Image (spheres, rainbow, N blue to C red):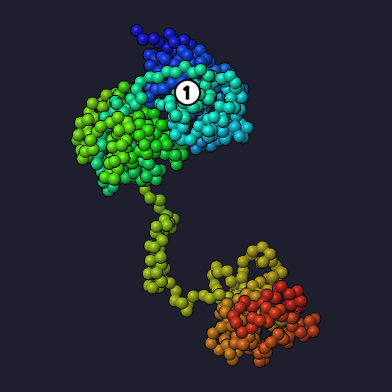
Amino acid sequence: MSATFFDLGVPAEICAALDDRGITTPFPIQAATIADALAGRDVCGRAPTGSGKTLAFGIPLVATVERSRPGHPRALVLAPTRELAEQIMSELSAIAGRVRVGVVYGGVGYAGQITALRRGVDLLVACPGRLEDLISQGLVHLDEVDRVVIDEADRMADMGFLPVVRRLLDQTAQPRQTVLFSATLDGDVAQLTADHQRNPVRHEVGEETPDITVADHVFWLAGPANRTELTVEAVNAVWPAIVFSRTRHGSDRLARQLTQNGIATAAIHGGRSQAQRNRALADFSQGRVQALVATDVAARGIHVDGVAAVIHYDPPEDHKTYIHRSGRTARAGQGGVVLSLVQPHQRKDASRMQRHVGLEEPMVEPDAAALRARSDAVSPIGGTRREVPPVPAPEPERQPRNGRPGNRHDRSERSERSERSERSGRRPDGERRPARGDRPRRNEPRSGNDRNGPDGRSTERNGAERSARAKRGGLNLASRVRLPRDGSAAPDSSGGARGRWSDGDGRSSRDGGGAGRANGAGRQPANGRSGPGATGGQRTGAAAGRPARSGPKAGAAAAGPKNGGKAPARSKAQAGSAGRPSSPPNPAGNRKARRAHLQWS
């Protein structure tokens, strides 16, 4: 008769919680390690994935952990991935009773985790990166941690977490109990055991590669163009299935392609938020999706029972990755199918990997019927095959505002439509576009609700620019020249006005060039002087009824009486700009010129 949890020394309240969940008989790894862990010894255990390691270290932790104060946990469990940390926390919370269990990992906000730590956490489950971040902020202190568990230590080594794990262990209390579980106990894991464990009790359960020997392995020859089609056939034959892709973008692309082919699919990888990853795992474990597309980073964090197939869409990096991926199926005594899609240039690598894991499987042509026949003995959860879940309908495209395409891919359509409208003389909405000669020009009087009043001046009220002083004096804010009420032009003493240049008929321009410049005709500024495009730098005085003068004294006759009839001196830059198009000088930059403008008006 096999031993029970009570026979192993587990407290009665924890045994009752296990009974409520239907767990009455311990797994081999649990029967081998629980007694030593309850006695306070360091334990080094090797067991396959899905063998019950979580309860093997969780039961002794819950039974022996002491009450903690805020920010100072008493027990610590380190896990390599978010999903694994979340699942460990869920397993321990079900049997914790009064023990406060918390979890911290990256990819989510800090607020909830900080709140839990400030309230007090007795047993903390953490990913190394986020835990070290919280320690650097002074929110967590490990000086009172006297029980540490390192789960999936070999995966920690593969992901490069061992240096962080060593730094965290150095911050814990001395002496402490250290429990380590791993699928392999060689290499970096062996060195970690030698450095941070004291005379550990070693327990090894099962074979080195139990998922390899139990699962049924199939290798299909595939081409680059038909891998997605073969994946659709395989998932329809055997599901629920986990499909492994190498990259995040590849996972998202494959998930979209499978959905388009009628396969209910979800994707999980490091680029998704924790809420999206939890939702994908929940949909997959509850049978709402047929396929879960995942990357290697998420492989160790997926612990779902009843996975019928694992599909290697992209080949694994090495034989260890192949073992980790394939370990998602054939768990807890059930069978499973492991399918690999091998392209022609990958046949040598696939043969080499088979030798490393002890397989001798032929590479055959795809055959979905044969795959279905192999999986008949590997029925999903409960011994019956699930019904195919309905594929969710694609989300309707967001309707742009005003009925116009708002997607960046529709820019060509918009430009083409505008071009057709310009040629036809119609607006995109079908309304007739006014002829060019009928369109209002700048500075011309407008009617209706336009911004210019009947006299051509703006009627808007906009702070200081539309102050009462500007309205009473008729100040032209564009050129900073005070104009008379009758609309006639006032002379300017600075050799030009700042702003727009107007034609004799009221039209505006910025260049002042065109026909009739040499003889003083054509466009003129509102103050009676020529624009910068006049030939030879001359300024016409047509508005004042006198011939144009050239040189720096061109504006002397227009100066006010306080200035003695002299125009302000021009700078070298202004003098050298004569004869070539340029912006007119700014009278507001010269105090004397500005004072002359105001006095003249």
502 to the left or right of 364: right
- On the image, the x and y values in percent for residue 192 come to 50, 27
Give the residue drawn at x 30%, y 43%: 346
Taking 41 as reference, is 572 above or below it? below
Q: How many discs appear?
A: 1
On the rendered image, what quadrant is the N terminus found in? top left
In this image, 516 relative to 247: left or right? Answer: right
Provide residue 140's location: percent of width, then percent of height.
60, 29
How crowded pointer 1 is (Cα within 10 Å; few <14, some 14-19, many 20+) is rated as many
- At horizontal 62% and vertical 87% (from top left) the residue drawn is 536
- In the rendered structure, the answer to whether residue 432 lies left or right of residue 557 reads left
In the image, residue 420 sits, relative to residue 70, either above or below, namely: below
Q: Amino acid at mark 1?
A: Leu
Q: Which residue is mark 1?
A: 180
Q: Quadrant of residue 246?
A: top left
* The C terminus sits in image quarter: bottom right
What residue is rendered at 49% in x and 18% in y? Answer: 200
Residue 495 in the figure: left or right of residue 76:
right
Give x and y (percent) for residue 424.
Answer: 37, 72
Tell me where residue 276 sits by quadrant: top left
| Circle 1 SS class | strand
Q: Nearer the viewer, residue 360 or 217?
A: 360
Kindly identify the residue that appears in the image at 76 percent across and 84 percent down: 566
